[in-house]
């Protein structure tokens, strides 16, 4: 009986889909460029380009592509998010992290579909206090820079509550 139970458990463990046993993906290397006055890495630019009107489906290099669960494009912003833009497009992420904090999604808010991006947001599945402590321990500093194209400052703000943290980059 014990042997049959062990054998059944072993077969089930090895037959689990790869997504269940997925290795966490560190998005930090492709998101650190944002700390330098909201510079954008090639992965960030690919995400941004995929949100434009009639853009092709999002394709990222591995391991990032395999951690994308779904994307939404051109949704009307919720009432709570209206201050950030009229529309939003998101990439939902599984098993991803940013400086050791669970990364849930990346969202762009923009004024009219595909036109002007206003805010780039990282949603972290961690309380604000924990996130601030973790980012401070990693010496993360978000620089402000003058953007000559928009004639405004590009900067980042860390906000949230007891459940979530939002790192918002104002472009």
Image (cartoon, rainbow, N blue to C red):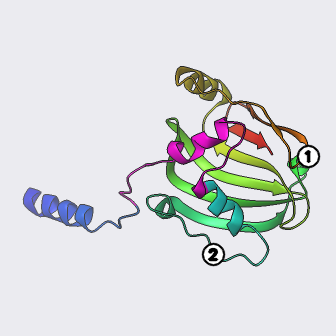
**Which numbered circle lies on residue 57?**
2
The image position of residue 27, as x and y in percent, is 52, 47
Q: CA distance from mark 2 to mark 1?
A: 28 Å
Across and down, in percent, residue 154 comes to 80, 39
- The image quadrant where one finds the C terminus is top right
Mark 2 vs mark 1: in front: 2
**Vertical comparison of 135 with 81: above or below:** above
Image quadrant in which the N terminus is located: bottom left
67 left or right of 45?
left
> Is 17 drawn above or below residue 88 in the view shown?
below
Q: Position of residue 69 (x, y in %)?
A: 56, 63
Q: Tell me which segment is drawn in magenta.
A: 20-43
Secondary-structure class at tag 1? helix
Within 10 Å of disc 1 (Cα), the crowding (few <14, some 14-19, many 20+) is few
Q: Which mark is residue 113?
A: none
Please report the residue visible at 61 percent of the width from the left and 42 percent of the height from the top: 33
Q: What residue would you read off at disc 1?
A: 83
Residue 39 belongs to the span the image colors magenta? yes
In front of the other: 164 or 120: 120
Kind of element beneath mark 2: loop
Is 128 part of what is drawn in magenta?
no
């Amino acid at each position: 009986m014990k042997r049959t139970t062990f054998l059944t458990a072993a077969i089930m463990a090895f037959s689990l889909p790869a997504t269940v046993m997925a290795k966490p993906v560190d998005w930090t290397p492709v998101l650190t460029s944002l700390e330098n006055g909201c510079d954008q890495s090639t992965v960030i630019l690919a995400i941004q380009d995929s949100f434009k009107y009639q853009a092709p489906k999002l394709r990222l290099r591995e391991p990032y592509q395999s951690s994308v669960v779904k994307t939404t494009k051109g949704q009307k912003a919720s009432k709570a998010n209206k201050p950030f833009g009229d529309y939003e497009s998101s990439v939902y992420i599984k098993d991803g992290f940013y400086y050791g904090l669970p990364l849930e999604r990346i969202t762009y808010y923009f004024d009219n579909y595909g036109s002007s991006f206003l805010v780039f947001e990282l949603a972290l599945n961690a309380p604000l206090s924990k996130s601030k402590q973790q980012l401070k321990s990693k010496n993360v500093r978000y620089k402000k820079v003058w953007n000559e194209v928009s004639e405004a400052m590009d900067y980042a703000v860390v906000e949230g509550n007891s459940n979530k943290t939002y790192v918002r980059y104002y472009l």
